[in-house]
Amino acid sequence: MADATSNAESFTASRLTRGNFFFPTRIVVSPEHVLRIKPRLFGSTQESIAIPAVASVQISTGVFWSDIRIDSSGGSNPISSHGHRKRDAQRIRDLVERFQLPRR
């Protein structure tokens, strides 16, 4: 049986964007959850939303970079990240939607 993390994909924000120069934010999408990892000098901060609890994925595209916001149906704080390539933001949305299909 395959490990669930083998289906996970990771997306790293550009170092050229605000707040990502030294420690770029990563978004990891797996069949179980969406995880935002923000590294720090010592350790990291992680936020996650279970795939069945994702209510919406919003992408705001600028000239060079896209911002992404993932809202929870449980009313908790959304996961947001900026500085991703447009195709990465679209791939994140597509993965979340694909992983939600079997559960509906």
Image: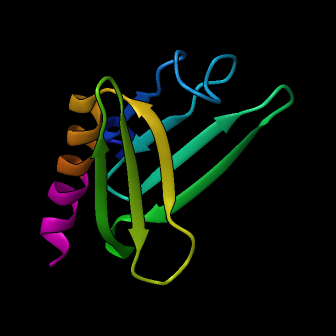
Q: How is the image coloured?
A: rainbow
**Residue situated furthest right in the rendering:** 42
Image quadrant assignment for residue 102: bottom left
Q: Which residues are magenta?
A: 96-104
Main SS type for the magenta part?
A: helix
The residue lying toward the viewer, choosing from 62 and 101, is 62
Q: Is residue 1 visible to the viewer in this orientation of the structure?
A: no
Residue 95 magenta-drawn? no
In which quadrant is the C terminus drawn? Answer: bottom left
Q: Residue at x 53, y 23 (%)?
A: 17
Above-or-below relation of 24 to 56 = above
**Residue situated furthest bottom in the rendering:** 74
The residue lying toward the viewer, choosing from 16 and 44, is 16
Q: Residue at x 41, y 56 (%)?
A: 69
Q: Is residue 94 visible to the viewer in this orientation of the structure?
A: yes
Above-or-below relation of 28 to 86 = below
Above-or-below relation of 104 to 48 = below
In which quadrant is the N terminus drawn? Answer: top left
From the top left corner, tell me how far across and down residue 86 is, in percent: 25, 31
From the top left corner, tell me how far across and down residue 43 is, in percent: 80, 34
